[in-house]
Amino acid sequence: MLIAIDERDARPIYQQIASQVKEQIQRGELQQGDELPPVRELADSLGINLHTVRNAYLKLRDQGVINLRLGRRARVARPRHIPATPTEADMALSGQLRELAADAFLLGLSADELHALLDRHLGHGSAPESDSKERR
């Protein structure tokens, strides 16, 4: 597992760590049962406070992404077999989606451009942005 802190990223470090773990799971780089580094080891390797890593791991645990047990290493949890209901998805994602929509608006993106960007990040998009501009 490779984690890199981006000092230019406005998000808190614990959120960067949690996001990178989830992205690695999405890409298949981390799979069910894989161990994450111990809190102290990851904190030392990143040069950050161990409580920052602990907060990231607690966030991931609360989201059902990892399993944490006292005295054991954190492990990637089993993925959901049943997709979230629309109500569950709305409860879990509405805050992030509202912020994303506001950020897209402030960047001057249309709804279609935001959808295309999201599709690319989900792996559903066809061509990268530079390719699609060349085709116009």
Image (cartoon, rainbow, N blue to C red):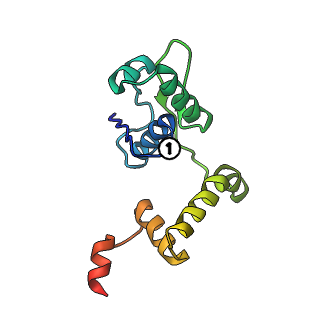
How many discs mark residues in the rendered view?
1
SS category of the residue bearing label 1? loop
- Determine whether 61 is above or below 109 in the image: above
- Three-letter residue code for mark 1: Arg
In x, y percent, where is residue 52?
50, 27
Toward the viewer: 56 or 102? 102
Q: Is residue 69 left or right of residue 38?
A: right
- Residue 80, by quadrant, is top right
In x, y percent, where is residue 42?
38, 24
Q: Residues within 10 Å of mark 1 (few under 14, many from 20)?
A: few
In x, y percent, where is residue 124?
42, 67
Task: Please identify the quadrant where the C terminus is shown.
Answer: bottom left
The residue at the point 59 percent across, 37 percent down is 64
User: As drawn, which residue projects farthest toward the bottom?
Assistant: 136
- Determine whether 75 is above or below 131 in the image: above
User: As drawn, which residue projects farthest toward the top?
Assistant: 71
Q: Is residue 38 left or right of residue 136?
A: right
Q: Is residue 51 left or right of residue 95?
A: left
Could one spot residue 108 in this view of the protein? yes
In x, y percent, where is residue 14?
50, 34
Toward the viewer: 83 or 96? 96
The residue at the point 40 percent across, 65 percent down is 120
User: As drawn, which residue projects farthest toward the right?
Assistant: 87
Task: Please identify the quadrant where the N terminus is shown.
Answer: top left
- Determine whether 95 is above or below 115 in the image: above
Query: What residue is disc 1 on?
Result: 11
Could one spot residue 84 in this view of the protein? no
